[in-house]
Image: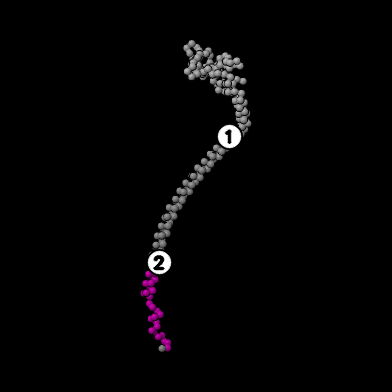
Amino acid sequence: MAYKDKYEVLGVIVALATNGLSVYKKGEEEGQISGGNIGDFVVRAKGEDGFAAVSIIGEQEWEEMPQNEAAEIELKEIASSAKDLAPELAKAKNEIERLKAEILEAKGEAERFKEECTNLQDHVSASAGENLALSQKIQKLEAENKKLKEATKKEDKNKADSAPKTNESQKGLNLGGNE
């Protein structure tokens, strides 16, 4: 397996020269090489005895290449863990979808409840208006009733005052009794 630690990066291809070669650059240093595409890495392999041939490694291949053997092992463990977590991830996604559906249902219920509350509030307002009108009518009727009671009392008193006093007028009369 190839590791980044086994290469020295000479630069990244930044342009194509008019002579058909690729121009690579690292910092202020620049060079030319045959082949490659913009973004590819120009590297020199580190051999047991030092450095060896210069080659071009594609940008994606370089990005995916592990730094060293330990990094490769770690990547494999991560990939294995990811495979182990795949069923859990699927369950979590299903749960998320279920919860989204519940949320939408709850929003619908909340909207219906809101409409019902608005209707009830309108009904309460209408009833309050009717109640006020009835209260005013009751007050008016109570006032009329009070006036009628007072008028009836006056009339009864007037009748009582104008009626002959039969008991008192008959006291003085002797209708054949013992006197």
- Amino acid marked by disc 2: Lys
- In the drawing, what numbered circle is on residue 93? 1
Task: Examine the structure image and report whether residue 172 is included in the region drawn in magenta.
Answer: yes
Question: Considering the numbered disc 1 on the image, is that residue within a helix, a strand or a loop?
Answer: helix
Task: Examine the structure image and report whether residue 119 is included in the region drawn in magenta.
Answer: no
Residue at image mark 2: 149
- Amino acid marked by disc 1: Lys
Point out the residue furthest to the bottom here: 179
Residues in magenta, as a range: 151-178
* Figure check: 85 above or below 14: below
Is residue 131 something one can see in this rendering?
Answer: yes
CB-based contact (under 8 Å), mark 1 and mark 2: no
Answer with left or right where residue 151 lies relative to residue 78.
left
Closer to us: 35 or 27: 27
Q: Position of residue 171 (x, y in %)?
A: 40, 83
* Figure check: 14 above or below 145: above
Is residue 94 something one can see in this rendering?
Answer: no
**Looking at the image, which residue is at 59% across and 25% down?**
71
**Looking at the image, which residue is at 59% across and 21% down?**
3
Closer to us: 76 or 121: 76
**Looking at the image, which residue is at 53% across and 17% down?**
10
